[in-house]
Amino acid sequence: MTRAHNFNAGPAALPLDVLEKAQQEMVNFNNTGMSVMELSHRSKEYEEVHNEAISLLKELLQVPNNYEVLLLQGGASLQFPMIPMNFSPKDKTANYVLTGSWSEKALKEAKKLGETRIGASSSDSNYTYIPDADTIETEADDAYVHITSNNTIFGTQWQDFQLNTNAPLIADMSSDILSRPVPVERFSLIYAGAQKNLGPSGVTVVIVKKELLETAETNIPTLLSYNTHVDKNSLYHTPPTFAIYMLKNVLQWVKENGGASGMEKRNQEKASLLYDVIDNSNGFYKGHAEKDSRSIMNVTFNLATDELNKAFLDEAKKAGFVGLNGHRSVGGCRASIYNAVSVESCKALQEFMIDFQQKHQ
């Protein structure tokens, strides 16, 4: 079987070992005579899967004991309104740092629910950079400061998290969670849809500080309260059991391959393969992101003309590369090189890019 070189932005590549394990266990999980999808979420067999996923997240991300780890549904998009509903009281203002489309969407939802401000934005350059930490405006009445750690569409990523604020720091890490070690203790809440680095779509990871939970609003719908899910170990209602099973298997794979530090080394190697081609192409390939803001998850670039972009994408597709189309707001090309994308796939793309330039310059 020939596997595609999968550079999709999400849902994205999954480790082959994980897929093969799921294939083997598909109709008879743990000698139950059933698929994990058929198990009751109240059964001992499923609860072991559920709790192991949470335990692995805590281990791999080195989550301190004063945090809760939740497995929710609705993707990052449901977190956009949940966060202000829980943590933005009427006498405070939610502060958003805009670095791309997803932070814009998070702000849009927060505006419907309370007062907001924009602490900084790189929209002036079509989001080619991450604002310097010392340019981010914060105020004493900030309910929280919200950032998006990696921007899939524009190919930018926060390099560190040294923000000058006493307000709770909240991060959408949907597209780079577990791609590198992260200082969880600097954040009051981290959330991430699983479908890029952690597993298939359907489950959302939330890591939230207990101190922040103590301040949560209470007069909100039960299902939209974080404390509901804390109290019930993310089993208040039927969870996405298969997605959590796959999450657990991906986390085991990450652990076996060096944990967050191992992923960072691997991802930096993959990103360097592609950025080196861009930087040494004499302008044939032009990266969208400024060098000091480049993402190791999403490599975004354009060629000189729309015709060349189209030719590149057409030839790449014929050569077995999938998902290289750039987002319409940036155009051009995008290689999403999440944890499960192999070094070999990135080397193959590197060689294709060099060959394409030689044929078309």
Image (cartoon, grey):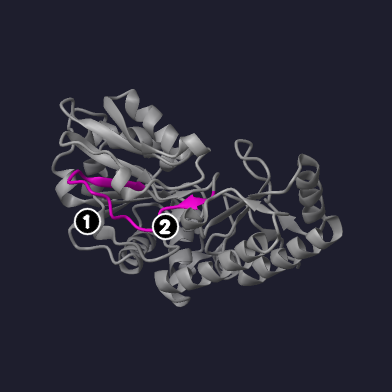
Residue 15 appears in the figure: no
Whole-angstrom CA distance, mark 2 to mark 1, is 16 Å
Neighbor class of circle 1 (other Cα within 10 Å; few <14, some 14-19, many 20+) is many
Q: Which mark is residue 16?
A: none
Q: Is residue 165 left or right of residue 291?
A: left
Residue shown at the point (23%, 59%) measured from the top left: 185
Residue 97 % position (x, y): 36, 39
Quadrant in which the N terminus appears:
bottom right
Which tag, 2 or 1, sits closer to the chain's start?
Answer: 1
Q: Pick out the residue farthest to the right.
A: 359
Q: How many numbered discs sit on the rendered protein?
A: 2
Q: Amino acid at mark 1?
A: Tyr
The answer to whether residue 73 is visible is yes
Closer to the camera, 62 or 181? 181
Amino acid at circle 2: Ile
Q: Is residue 127 above or below residue 2?
A: above
Q: Residue at x 57, y 64 (%)?
A: 271
Disc 2 versus disc 1: nearer the observer? 2
